[in-house]
Image (cartoon, rainbow, N blue to C red):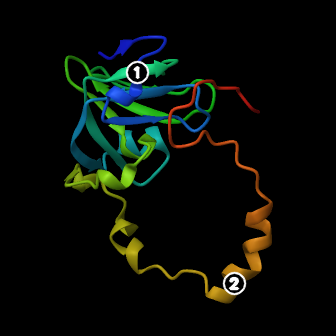
């Protein structure tokens, strides 16, 4: 289980991440075994076709801590109680798995293994071939995108956090 501390020197850790709103932040020494799980329980837990996750070594909560939901007789899942971001999968007696996209630099940890492929959603294999918006369609939507003020916490540690709703 991860150790909870009010404050640590996250710069001494090599990897950091957190939830969307910033109420929960973590640091760890390493991220190993990046994978995606296609099981139905993971699909429901993150509201997606699959769950990208990886083992966090020497995980420490640097701001707040996730609330937990016992999703089965063998595991619990951590999430931010303020914004709902799914954060962990914690098998009883096992390592803590963090959701890859909660990392500040998720591109560093590409999944190397697929789990529970028998449960994968049939259309997952076609995702890369889906069309995208044309340049003209994208340009027409730019004023809308430019008007959005995101309340997402930045992808780095901050000295303070103010909840916005």
132 or 26, which lies in front? 26
Read off the residue under disc 2. Answer: 137
Q: Position of residue 108 (x, y in %)?
A: 31, 52
- Where the C terminus falls, by quadrant? top right
Q: Position of residue 67 (x, y in %)?
A: 50, 19
Q: Secondary structure at mark 2?
A: helix
Question: Residue at 70% across / 42% down in the picture?
Answer: 151
Tell me if mark 1 has few (under 14), some (14-19) or many (20+) residues whose alpha carbon lies within 10 angstroms of its own. few
> Could you say which quadrant of the image residue 152 lies in?
top right
- How many circles with numbers are drawn on the protein? 2
- Residue 138 vertical placement versus 155 (above, below): below
Camera-nearest label, 1 or 2: 1
Question: Residue at 26% across / 54% down in the picture?
Answer: 111
- Where the N terminus falls, by quadrant? top left
> For this view, does 139 lie left or right of residue 56?
right
Q: Secondary structure at mark 1?
A: loop
Tell me if mark 2 has few (under 14), some (14-19) or many (20+) residues whose alpha carbon lies within 10 angstroms of its own. few
Comes first in the chain, label 1 or label 2: 1
Question: Residue at 45% across / 38% down in the picture?
Answer: 45
Q: Position of residue 148 (x, y in %)?
A: 76, 56
- Residue 86 vertical placement versus 37 (above, below): above
> Could you say which quadrant of the image residue 39 lies in?
top left
Q: CA distance from mark 1 to mark 2?
A: 45 Å
- Residue 99 vertical placement versus 67 (above, below): below
- Which disc, if any, is residue 58? none
- Residue 158 vertical placement versus 131 (above, below): above
Q: Position of residue 48 (x, y in %)?
A: 46, 51
Read off the residue under disc 1. Answer: 9
> For this view, does 60 lie left or right of residue 79?
left
């Amino acid at each position: 289980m991860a150790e909870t501390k009010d404050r640590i020197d996250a710069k001494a850790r090599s990897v950091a991440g957190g939830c969307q709103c910033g109420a929960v932040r973590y640091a760890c020494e390493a991220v190993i075994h990046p994978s995606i799980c296609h099981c139905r329980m993971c699909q429901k837990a993150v509201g997606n076709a699959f769950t990208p996750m990886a083992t966090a070594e020497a995980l420490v909560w640097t701001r707040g801590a996730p609330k937990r939901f016992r999703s089965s007789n063998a595991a619990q899942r951590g999430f931010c109680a303020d914004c709902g971001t799914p954060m962990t999968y914690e098998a009883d007696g096992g390592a803590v798995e963090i959701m890859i996209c909660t990392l500040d630099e998720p591109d560093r940890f590409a999944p190397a293994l697929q789990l529970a492929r028998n449960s994968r959603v049939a259309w997952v294999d076609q995702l890369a071939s889906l069309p995208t918006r044309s340049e003209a369609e994208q340009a027409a939507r730019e004023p809308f995108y430019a008007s959005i003020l995101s309340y997402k916490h930045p992808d780095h540690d901050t000295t303070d956090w103010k909840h916005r709703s």
